[in-house]
Image (cartoon, grey):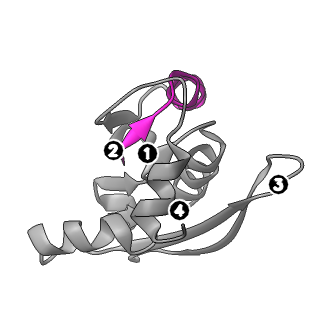
Amino acid sequence: GVSLAGEAMEQGLRDCCRSIRIGKILIQSDEETQRAKVYYAKFPPDIYRRKVLLMYPILSTGNTVIEAVKVLVEHGVQPSVIILLSLFSTPHGAKSIIQEFPEITILTTEVHPVAPTHFGQKYFGTD
């Protein structure tokens, strides 16, 4: 698994799959330009031989996930072995990712044009 989600989704994954190896990517979007910038990436050394669960709770524009997939590809991961797990996605976000990486699999619990920002605040305890 590779977490863009901080600890939130990661703990659930650890609880159910104790032996899973977890990598981390820290990406932040510039408020003004909406450009996503990679600040940190650390993966298991054999990540290119693994299937990758990429966890990102709320998929809005898709920019952050696209940058994350680019980093994974730079580390030898084929997009076809990446499964993006998100709790929520906008149609625009999902389309952006699929246009850039058609082979990726996206699993989400809900697709809706308006991203639930209040959900993120509750989920991450930032309200």
Q: Please, what secondary structure does the residue beneath circle 1 have?
A: loop
Residue under the image location 35 percent in, 34 percent down: 105
Task: Specify the segment rendered in magenta.
Answer: 85-101
Q: Which residue is mark 2?
A: 81
Q: How far apart in space, not on screen, are marks 4 and 1 (Cα)?
A: 9 Å
Disc 2 residue crowd, few under 14, some 14–19, many 20+, Cα 10 Å: some
Position of residue 111 measured from the top left corner of the image (x, y, whole percent)? 40, 26
Contact (CB < 8 A) between labels 2 and 4? no
Disc 3 residue crowd, few under 14, some 14–19, many 20+, Cα 10 Å: few
Q: Which residue is mark 3?
A: 31
Residue under the image location 12 percent in, 77 percent down: 18
**Is label 3 or label 1 in front?**
3
Number of marks present in the image shown: 4
Q: How far apart in space, not on screen, are marks 2 and 3 (Cα)?
A: 31 Å
Contact (CB < 8 A) between labels 3 and 1? no
Residue under the image location 50 percent in, 41 percent down: 116
Disc 4 residue crowd, few under 14, some 14–19, many 20+, Cα 10 Å: some
Q: How far apart in space, not on screen, are marks 3 and 1 (Cα)?
A: 30 Å
Q: Which residue is mark 4?
A: 75
Q: Please, what secondary structure does the residue beneath circle 2 have?
A: helix
Q: Is residue 14 left or right of residue 106?
A: left
Q: Earlier in the sequence, mark 2 or mark 3?
A: 3
Residue under the image location 41 percent in, 34 percent down: 104
Q: Amino acid at mark 1?
A: Gln
Q: Is residue 64 left or right of residue 25?
A: right
Position of residue 43 measured from the top left corner of the image (x, y, whole percent)? 45, 74
Q: How far apart in space, not on screen, are marks 3 and 4 (Cα)?
A: 28 Å
Instruction: Please say whether residue 72 is one of the residues in the magenta stretch.
Output: no
